[in-house]
Image: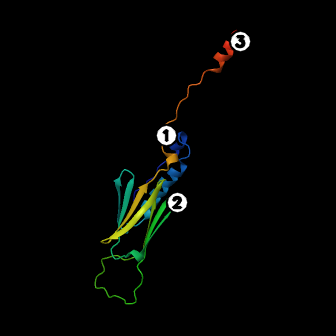
Amino acid sequence: MAMRTFDFSPLYRSTVGFDSVTRLLESALRADEGQNSYPPYNIEKTGENAYRITMAVAGFSESDITITAQDNSLVVTGKIAKTEEEKKFLHRGIAGRAFERRFELAEHIRVSGASLVNGLLHVDLVKEVPEAKKPRTVKIETVAPKQATVLENQAA
């Protein structure tokens, strides 16, 4: 098992307020090492400010899956409800075990919708930057220097 460590201290010398980003990177590296791969998923960019997470959740219905978006976190959990009749499998290749998958979302990303089609759960995300946070042009005003008017008044 290869050990991966990264030293983020050089970033602290030239950045201000990005300590949460380095914590996010460190936690992502730790989670990646220990997290299982169930259920498999894709993350795709579907537009300029649009994304989609697709998870393979064969055997789960809409009522078995919960999607929770809070702050900058998205949590998808799945748990198949117990049925009264017990099935007797000769071979069980379709995993139906409970899962919890967490995604850290960037600032201004919100969940715009979700759908379950043919065993694939699609979670659509959109980036909506508030008008106050968008770049704006600042007008530069020309102001007459005060010293010039003071000297003119003294000379008169």
Q: Name the residue under label 2.
A: 71
Q: Name the residue under label 3.
A: 154
Badge 2: residue crowd in 10 Å (few <14, some 14–19, many ≥20): few
Badge 1: residue crowd in 10 Å (few <14, some 14–19, many ≥20): few
Quadrant location of the N terminus in the rendered image: bottom left
Q: Earlier in the sequence, mark 1 or mark 3?
A: 1
Q: Looking at the rendering, which quadrant does residue 80 occupy?
A: bottom left
Amino acid on which disc 3 is placed: Gln
Mark 3: which secondary structure? helix
Residue at mark 3 to residue at mark 2: CA–CA distance: 62 Å
Q: Which residue is drawn at 39% across and 74% down?
A: 62
The location of residue 55, given as percent across then percent down, is 36, 66
Q: Which residue is drawn at 54% across and 40% down?
A: 13
Of the two numbered discs 2 and 1 in the rendering, the one whose residue sits closer to the viewer: 1
| Residue 55 seen | yes
Q: Looking at the rendering, which quadrant does residue 64 occupy?
A: bottom left
Of the two numbered discs 1 and 3 in the rendering, the one whose residue sits closer to the viewer: 3
The location of residue 50, given as percent across then percent down, is 38, 55
Amino acid on which disc 1 is placed: Arg
Q: Residue 42 carries which label?
A: none
| Residue 3 seen | no
Compared to residue 115, the image places residue 131 above or below, namely above
Q: Earlier in the sequence, mark 3 or mark 2?
A: 2
Mark 1: which secondary structure? loop
The location of residue 56, given as percent across then percent down, is 33, 69
Of the two numbered discs 3 and 2 in the rendering, the one whose residue sits closer to the viewer: 3
Q: Mark 1 points at which residue?
A: 136
Q: Residue at x 68, y 16 (%)?
A: 150
The location of residue 140, given as percent across then percent down, is 53, 30
Q: In this view, does 154 lie to the left or right of 143?
A: right
